Image (cartoon, rainbow, N blue to C red):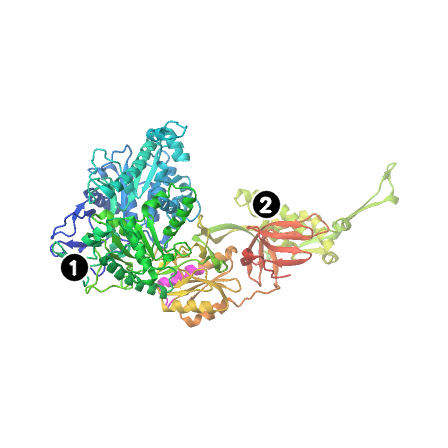
Amino acid sequence: MAGITHLIINSAYKEPQQHWEYDIVNQSFYLKDGRRDAGYIVASQEQSGSNQQGRFIPLPVVNEIRKRVKAWRENNYPGITGITRKLLEHWHNEDQRTYPFYFCQLDAMETLIWWTEAPATERVGIKLQGDGSEFQRICTKMCTGSGKTTVMAMLIAWMVCNKVAYPQDKRFTKYVFVVTPGLTVKKRLASLMFGGTANEYVSFNIVPSSLMQYLRQGIIKIENWQYLSWETQEQIDKKKSVDKRPPKSDKAYARGVLQELSRYNNILVINDEAHHAWRVNTEVKIGLKGQDKKDYLENEAQATVWIGGLDRINRVNRILTCYDFTATPFAPSGKRNDEEALFGWIISDFGLNDGIESGLVKTPRVVVRDDGEQVIEGKTIKSKLYHLYRDEEVQANLSRPAKPEEPLPDLLNQAYYLLGKDWQVTYEAWKKAGAKTPPVMITVANRTETAARIKAAFLRGDINVPELTDPKYLIQIDSKMLKSLETVSGSKKDKEDELREIVDTVGKVGKPGQDIRKVISVGMLSEGWDARTVTHIMGLRAFSSQLLCEQVVGRGLRRTSYDRQEANPELFAPEYVNIFGIPFSFLPHEEDDDGKDIPDKPRTQISVIQERKNYEISWPNIVRFDTEYKQNLTIDYTDIPELVLNATDTRLSADLAPIVNGQTDITKLMTIDLEKLEAELRMQTVVFKAAGNVFDQLKDEWAKSGTRGGLLGKLVKLTEAFLQSDKIRIEPELFMVDGLRKRILLMMNMTKIIQHLCKYITDSWTEKIVPVYDPLKPVMSTGDMITWFTTKACLTTIKSHISHVACDSQMEATEATILERNTHVTAYAKNDHLDFKIPYLFNGALLNYIPDFLIRLDNGHLLVLETKGKMRPKDVAKREALTKWVEVVNSTKEFGIWHNDISFNTADVDGIIEKYCSKKKTKRPSQVAVMGELFTETDDSKYKSMAIFGELFDESSGIKNRKVVHSKFGPGVVEGVDEHNNIAIRFEDGKVRLFEESAISKGFIKLEE
């Protein structure tokens, strides 16, 4: 019977609809409708001929919970709090994020919520087994690559936000303690901290913006399990030091471990890779021997510290709930290698089979036959390469201590040669595609001597794959040594830290491990090792259980990209890892009908090139638009009559004489002449005086109608326009010609002017569409993009902050090339993984539109360009929304000048760009106007300079977006400074200089001098 030709059969975003089931009679897999039951398989020591798959053990509690959670979900989550409902609605709203949450993530989180918030009747008849702890443990089983870290962030957000909103609800807490199995995982889980923007909550939009202030009230601490260790009385007694202080009390211990958290009770604990945290059963007699016994005792010591430390914390601060996350929730029994005790507190299960069938991990391919001598297992004929370590010669050879120069067994050399040559084909394909990192082959060996022999064999060239024989690209690592680095200090630690850094960064561009091609590990690579470039795995140890196989293979199953299949866009395109020596008898694996290899496409890494900072493009991160109502003041000049001021009624001078004996002595006159005294009187002073009087006259009336604030600035403009209009006439007309006399006369007749003007000022309300920014990230840029991988055709960029353009069509590829060549384009970026999106409505639903290109032109303007073959009704709605977005953004005058257009043919791109480059920068603007609500004068008569508040408006050069918030004074100089404390405009010695906004980061560009 033909084997499985396509393992990926389910969408990662929907509940699995089918699964591969094994037919024992026919010894083959077939498709079965429905979701796979929760359970696991243990391979027996002696598999029978009729059962090559081992023994399937169902998880009845998990399967029952799964049914009840589904019914609860379909019934709209009865019993949940308002905060939880808000979170669930946010998580299920696919338009809130570029990529929706996986079904397994939502299912895991909803199950945790169901257990806590659903009515008690929902849980009748369900009882979780404990491990003997005095606190409750709940386990979520999720396979490698399914997004456990994001679920942890969702869990923390749910707990903290509910506690802040409902402080009396004892089901929740805002104090979180996360325990990790090692330094690598601890570094990765730093994204669970609340600070900054590069965390899980912001990157994956875990909480709506309205709840972010709630989330930040939580306190979180993340530590390695080693941090929980303490000195026992026995250890103290053995110390040679004179310091014989007794062991710490539980209270002192908890204070030292939890630090700030020790002040609070009801701690939420999260154990990552929780299969390390198991409670030792002292009544079980260890039946293992040799290295197996040593490994068990080492794991037992770690588990004792981990669980014992939590016990001590619980006695002092009380653990509300301990949430365990792991792909393999087993504890070793201590009896046989193939026996593990499954955690009894599992409530949800998304296993490796589910992950493979949903495309969340790479598709494993194993050897099913070769052209050499085969082996018979029961009624099945298998290749010796299928489980190399089971071959008697290989097992005997590798089980003994041997020197590095001893050659490997022939069968192992053959296996490496075949796997190495296949790796070489992949290496050449990636190299041809321009990949910056090579594919990686990993070996998991049984002991240090074996690893040394393998390394020596490659370096000697025994395996004829030249690309794998260079010592610069080959690394040998002992997992036990890596664990020891958690406590090592000094120069030894520095050296070994370098090794850890290389191992931890395999496959990561710009990191020490970027060029590694071959990794030889003794034992399993540590959890958290997430090299996504692993394409080949060699297993050289005993594999007798699901636990071992999943833990070893899991290190190489992380995908490099999440491209969709062309034939079925709902499904992820497969990525492959080829495996020798690891028996996948209990896992479905892919093979072709004729046994031929299925080639794996090379992946291109798309990343931000930091050295190209000058090509960075920024944009406002708008979540929605609101309507803002503002009061407006107007004067209808058609209704206002002319006001005549008679100069003869205005006194501009007066003579004063001293009084002598009751009489005035006119020979000693003293004259008060306003024309001389007010020689410095400026029109702006008159304007402010008049506007202030008008405001005082009308403020009580406006206060009654609730329309008082913000009107003084508008009055300044209206008053200035009225005083300079033809609605004021002075007789005789000589006063209209003489500027100083006119200003003095206006000032002296202020009461008449105000009484006349107030009658004709009307106030009204105007509507204005304003953007609402994301409070966490109000401005985004190309520099925020997270590195990703793709199998799409890619164009290497020159004029972009992003390394490549991933092309969805030939039209996009051609237009990207045109953008590179067009001299008016100074920078551009394909809007892929940038999270630049435009909210729009279509058929009553709020959706997000993702345009194709962002372009910066040589005049500083920005263009959003869409490529489209033809317009559909939905495209019309998108275009209208983008046009509105551009109009609103431009109206803020804060983010430059934006345009939008659509290209229906590659031939029209240059014309579109030319259209928006028609307004060139000019060295001498035709108009410079400084507008605003407040104008003042300096008191220094020698340097008459105007302080600037408001907006800078330069019609010809397009600078309409610089808000001047305050001014700086100096001898002969006034600088208008914007909200970033950058100079927007400068008056100096009678000259004006404007400064372009886009040049802020590089220094100012003078547009006029």
Whether residue 881 is in magenta: the answer is: yes
Which quadrant is home to the C terminus?
A: bottom right
Q: Which residues are magenta?
A: 868-883
Above or below, comparing residue 790 to residue 689 in the picture: below
Comparing 298 with 913, the one in front is 298
| Circles 1 and 2: CB atoms closer than 8 Å | no
Number of residues whose C-alpha sits closer than 10 Å to that of mark 2, classed few (under 14), some (14–19) or many (20 or more): some
Q: Which residue is mark 1?
A: 374
Comparing 851 with 231, the one in front is 231
What secondary structure is the stretch in magenta mostly built from? helix
Q: Residue at x 60, y 46 (%)?
A: 695
Q: Which residue is mark 2?
A: 698
Comparing 125 with 415, the one in front is 415
Q: Position of residue 173 (x, y in %)?
A: 36, 36
Q: Which of the two discs, 1 and 2, labels the residue nearer the N terminus?
A: 1
Q: Residue at x 73, y 54 (%)?
A: 740
Q: Position of residue 548 (x, y in %)?
A: 24, 48
Q: Position of residue 827 (x, y in %)?
A: 48, 63
Residue furthest to the bottom in view is 907
**Is 435 on the left-hand or right-hand side of 117?**
right
- Amino acid type of the residue that numbered disc 1 sits on in the rendered structure: Gln
Q: Say if residue 915 shows up in the picture.
A: yes
Whether residue 597 is in magenta: the answer is: no
Q: CA distance from mark 1 to mark 2?
A: 101 Å
